[in-house]
Image (cartoon, rainbow, N blue to C red):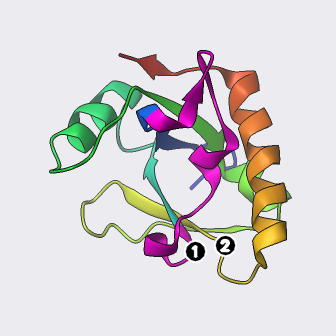
C-alpha cells in the first residue's frame, strides 16, 4: 500500500448522530479481536465496497468514509492487507493497545475521516 491509500470503512446506521458519523466507526468491537476491517481503496471504489458489504448477510451501511494508510502509520498502527475473506480485505491492528488508547486513536481517525468527508452515502 502507498501512504495515500484509502482504507474504506462502512458506517453502520447506529454510528451516525445528527448526520455525522461517530468515532465508533474506527473502534474495533470484541468480535473483531482488535482487528478493524477495512477495504483497500487501491482495489475497490467506495460505492462498490458498500454494495459488496450490504450483500453480506446481517451487514448494514449508510455510507463509506476513509482514513489513509499514512493516517494509521502516524498513529503507530499496522495495516495488514490479508485478502481474507475477500481480495480487497485489510485490517488495522489495534491488538497491542489498551482500551483507552484504542478510544483515543479512534477519535483521531474520526477527525481524519471527517476532514475527508463521506466518500459515498446512501
Eyeballing the image, is 77 above or below 5? below
Q: Residues within 10 Å of mark 1 (few under 14, many from 20)?
A: many
Do tag 1 and tag 2 residues touch (Cβ < 8 Å)? yes
Quadrant containing the C terminus is top left
Residue 105 position within the rendered picture, expressed as x and y whole percent measured from the top left: 80, 57
Q: Which residue sits furthest bottom?
A: 96
Inspect the magenta stretch and tell me whether residue 15 lies in it.
yes
To which quarter of the image does residue 76 belong? Answer: bottom right
Q: Which mark is residue 34?
A: 1
Residue 72 visible to an observer of this rendering:
yes
**Of helix, strand and loop, which one carries label 2?**
loop
Residue 33 at what x, y percent from top left?
50, 78
User: Is 97 on the left-hand or right-hand side of 65?
Assistant: right
Whole-percent x, y for residue 12 in the image = 43, 38
Residue in the picture at 46% in, 71% down: 32
Residue 92 vertical position relative to residue 118 in the rendered view, above or below: below
The residue labelled by disc 2 is 94
Side of 39 relative to 67 (left or right): left
Mark 1 and mark 2: Cα distance apart in space: 5 Å
Taking the spot 62% from the left edge, 50% from the top edge, the residue there is 26
The range drawn in magenta is 14-35
Amino acid at each position: 500500500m502507498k501512504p495515500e491509500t484509502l482504507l474504506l470503512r462502512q458506517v453502520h446506521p447506529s454510528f451516525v448522530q445528527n448526520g455525522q458519523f461517530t468515532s465508533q466507526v474506527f473502534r474495533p468491537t470484541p468480535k473483531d479481536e482488535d482487528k478493524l476491517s477495512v477495504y483497500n481503496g487501491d482495489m475497490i471504489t467506495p460505492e462498490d465496497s458498500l454494495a459488496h458489504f450490504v450483500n453480506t448477510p446481517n451487514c448494514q451501511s449508510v455510507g463509506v468514509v476513509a482514513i489513509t494508510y499514512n493516517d494509521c502509520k502516524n498513529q503507530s498502527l499496522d495495516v495488514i492487507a490479508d485478502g481474507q475473506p475477500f481480495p480487497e480485505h485489510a485490517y488495522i491492528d489495534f491488538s497491542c493497545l489498551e482500551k483507552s488508547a484504542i478510544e483515543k486513536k479512534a477519535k483521531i481517525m474520526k477527525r481524519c475521516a471527517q476532514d475527508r468527508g463521506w466518500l459515498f452515502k446512501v
